[in-house]
Amino acid sequence: MKKLTLTFCALFALFAAAPVIFADGPEYASGKKEVMQPAPPVCDFYRAHEWDLSIWGAFAFGADTGRTDNGQLQVDPFFPDTDPTTVDIFTGFNQEQAQDNQTERINLGQVSKNELFGRDDSWGGGVDVKYFWSRYFGVGIEALGLAAKTNFAGAGLATLTARYPFGRFAPYAWGGLGFLNGGATLYRFFNEQHTYAPGSQFFGSAGIYDNELFVANEHEFWTTDPVYNHHTRAIGQLGTGLEFRVTCHIGLMADFSWNFVFGQGDNHDDKLQLITLQGTDITNFQGAPVARTIVINQAFNVKPGHGSDHQDFGMARFGVTFSY
């Protein structure tokens, strides 16, 4: 009976002491305790000393859209009464000879109000590289390209960016300064094309004839063509946007900027240049040419100017950012 009582007392003591014995976790044969590893920390999406590479597409629109009203210029500058939509025989210089007059192509004036794209809007793209010396501020370089009318407008800028990260999001604002080159402006041209045919020319009282080329047909028409910008202008940029980090190193960005284009110190207006063309009027008597008269015709040609007028534009960008 005493043994049974002692056995029950030993078992009771063992159960009572078990929580204390195993309070620090189980021990293995080696004597080491099992250690629970904490979960790895979530990465910092926006960091100091960070390099960002952004590749983006862009849609740009000019500050000045539409076309200028130059309807009063839509005439033959030499013969204003001529209808340039028809094919005319012997209008202009009557029976002018090929060696006496070049084919006419006269600039009648600007058509597009926008002097960068040559139209209202354009598509393009670019890339920029930024270094953030803190989580909030960074410097960078931006390269921009836009498709002007049958031409290309490219710019390079140095930028300063400020951002305010929270979680995966970071609204930001930036400014930049650089240089812009290229682009085009639409102008209207008066064109005159000649078709030449052989004929006979009479010289002096000796009755000597010489075969020469005469204008057999004259076709007058208009064209609207781009005039390229071949000078470099300064450009300033101000914008704001939002970035979303999909992972610690890949993000999506969208922003909008306004771009100011400056001239080379001052604006240079369009200039009028006097064009003088010489032709020959042939007098016939009884079907034979008997005299030649030199004819001088003059018209004004428009030489496009340059400057900052009508080149400012807005630009929306959408792209991806790689962060390292």
Image (tube, rainbow, N blue to C red):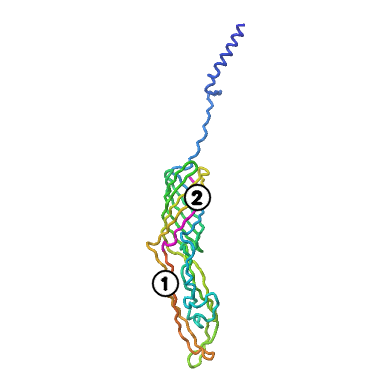
Quarter containing the N terminus: top right
Where does the magenta region start and end? 307-324
Dominant secondary-structure state across the stretch colored magenta: strand
Q: On residue 272, which mark appears?
A: 1
Residue 96 position, x and y percent, is: 50, 82
Q: Which residue, given by chain and number where applicable, does mark 2 sit on? A: 254
Q: Nearer the viewer, residue 260 or 57?
A: 260
Residue 317 lies in the magenta stretch: yes
**Res. 268 image quadrant:** bottom left
Residue 290 lies in the magenta stretch: no
Classify 249 as above or below 76.
above
Residue 249 position, x and y percent, is: 50, 44
Residue 42 position, x and y percent, is: 50, 38
Label 1: few (<14), some or many (≥20) within 10 Å?
A: some
Q: Earlier in the sequence, mark 1 or mark 2?
A: 2
Secondary structure beneath label 1: strand
Q: Amino acid at mark 2?
A: Ala
Q: Amino acid at mark 1?
A: Leu
Give the side of residue 213 with respect to residue 309, left or right. Answer: right
- Between the C-alphas of marks 1 and 2, the distance is 45 Å
Contact between marks 1 and 2 (CB within 8 A): the answer is: no
Q: Can you name the residue that lies furthest to the bottom here? A: 206
